[in-house]
Image (tube, rainbow, N blue to C red):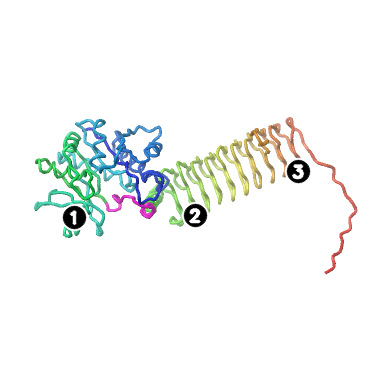
Amino acid sequence: MAHTAVILAAGKGVRMKSNLPKVVHKAAGKPLVAHVADAVRVAGIEDIIIVVGHGREEVQKVFAGDQVKFVTQEQQLGTGHALQQAEGMVDPGNTVLVLAGDIPLLRPSTLKVLLDYHQKQQAQATVLTTHLQEPTGYGRVLRDQNGGFLRIVEEKDASPEEKNITEINSGIYCFNAGSVFRVLHQLQPANAQGEYYLTDVLEILKGEGHRVEVMSAAEPEEIHGVNDRIQLAQAEKILRRRKNHQLMRDGVTLVEPDSIIIDSDVTIGRDTVLMPFTLIQGKTVIGEGCEIGPWTNINDSIIGNRVIIESSRVKEAEIGDDCIIGPYAYLRPGAFLHNKVKVGDFVEVKQSQIGEGSKIPHLSYVGDALVGKEVNIGAGTITCNYDGQHKHQTILEDYAFIGSNTNLVAPVRIGESSVTGAGSTITRDVPAQSLAVERADQRIVPWKKKKHDH
């Protein structure tokens, strides 16, 4: 049977105290609702509908270029009302999986088990539950004398005895699509909130004699929603722990893992070692056999094999194999390092290609440059790429040697195997196999230092 997932993401999330809708807040580098959508996809469902409302444009931005579909809930009148908005987009013969957009800890494996159970039981509805020692805030699952589903009572509608029940509703359901949408039209908001509860559908289907199942399979942490920034931090901590454990199981060494922060979408090859206090963000890809850190921050970058990066900042850059970076280097967006490049201490590279085997050992700025292979850029060299209005390119051809404290005033080209004298300001092109020197003559003046009275 075909499956459709409907993710409910229309609420504001008042307790977040934010101008943004709750579900776009990030945990482990990814919006909450994106975690949920990814879990659904890995569980095998490609047909995804997201119910949006408050801040819908921000939610839609999260999925820019993605294949998800959107439907708007203009008034937030409860979960039943939210699902009803998707009716025209779901094939009545499908199984529909319904879940909230603020549960980033949900595992795909749990969803797979739920879908399989629902299908094997030939149920019209199945609700996923778990047991909590402290169930306050959640709807309680009431069972009949035979242990079957009876009904779900929300916290605000529950009696004192019902509040003592520890089995709670996760808010995750499987339905036969035709059945659920038929019953949704019968719902009445007869509750403390004046809302249309999706849980009432279960009770109606049960009353009609249809099979309604309960599956208690979720680990309690999986169904914890994020309602405020404290819960956001708690979810983030769990996601990061899971990521670190997964990487270590896959052959990555984390030295003092509690100090290392890695986003969910980062990929790292085996035998790479991450040193303490390292932060790796975004969609960064790191190869095998690297040593990263300590005190290193990398985001949205591609890093080859056997790369060493020590105490440096790497932002939207690409680094080839066998490169050595740092300490205290800054690779900015558009930095592209070929294999065997060295970028040393207090070097900044931006929007530049650095050819194979080239070296920028220390105290230099290289911006908007095209650097050939086996080029040596001496300490204190800068590309003067900005004239106050426009950026200009510097080209250093293969085997060039740039003396210390050279100013390269762009646009300028240094030819193959040419040399600039230390302390020169180069404003004109230098032909191949030449020496360019620009200095004032040194003068020596007799000088007698005055003695100061103490």
**Which quadrant would the N terminus be assigned to in this image?**
top left
74 in magenta? no
Question: What residue is pinned by disc 3?
Answer: 423
Depth check: give the residue in front, 352 or 53.
53
Q: Is residue 28 left or right of residue 377?
A: left
Q: Give the distance between the C-alpha atoms of the residues marked 1 and 3, in whole angstroms.
A: 81 Å
- Is residue 26 visible in the rendered image? The answer is yes
Picture coordinates of residue 270 (x, y %)? 44, 46
- Residue positioned most to the right: 446
What residue do we see at 67% from left, 34% from top? 396
Residue 117 position, x and y percent, is 19, 42
Q: Quadrant of the C terminus?
A: bottom right
* Mark 1 in CB contact with mark 2 (< 8 angstroms): no
Counting other residues with Cα less than 10 Å from the Cα at mark 3, is it few (<14), some (14-19), or many (20 or more)? some
Q: Are marks 2 and 3 in contact (CB under 8 Å)?
A: no
Q: Is residue 241 visible?
A: no
Determine crowd level at label 2: few under 14, some 14-19, many 20+ residues with C-alpha closer than 10 A.
some
Q: Which residues are magenta?
A: 219-234
Q: Which residue position is annotated with label 2?
A: 277
Taking depth in this image into account, of 126 and 183 the one nearest to the observer is 183
Query: Is residue 157 or residue 390 the one in the foreground?
Result: 157
Distance from Cα at disc 2 to Cα at disc 3: 38 Å
Residue 351 position within the rendered picture, expressed as x and y whole percent measured from the top left: 59, 37
Spot the residue most to the bottom. Answer: 454
Name the residue type under label 2: Phe
Q: Amino acid at mark 3?
A: Gly
Labels 1 and 3 touching (C-beta < 8 A): no
N-terminal label among 1 and 2:
1
Q: Eyeballing the image, is 402 above or below 345?
A: above
Residue 226 is covered by the magenta coloring? yes
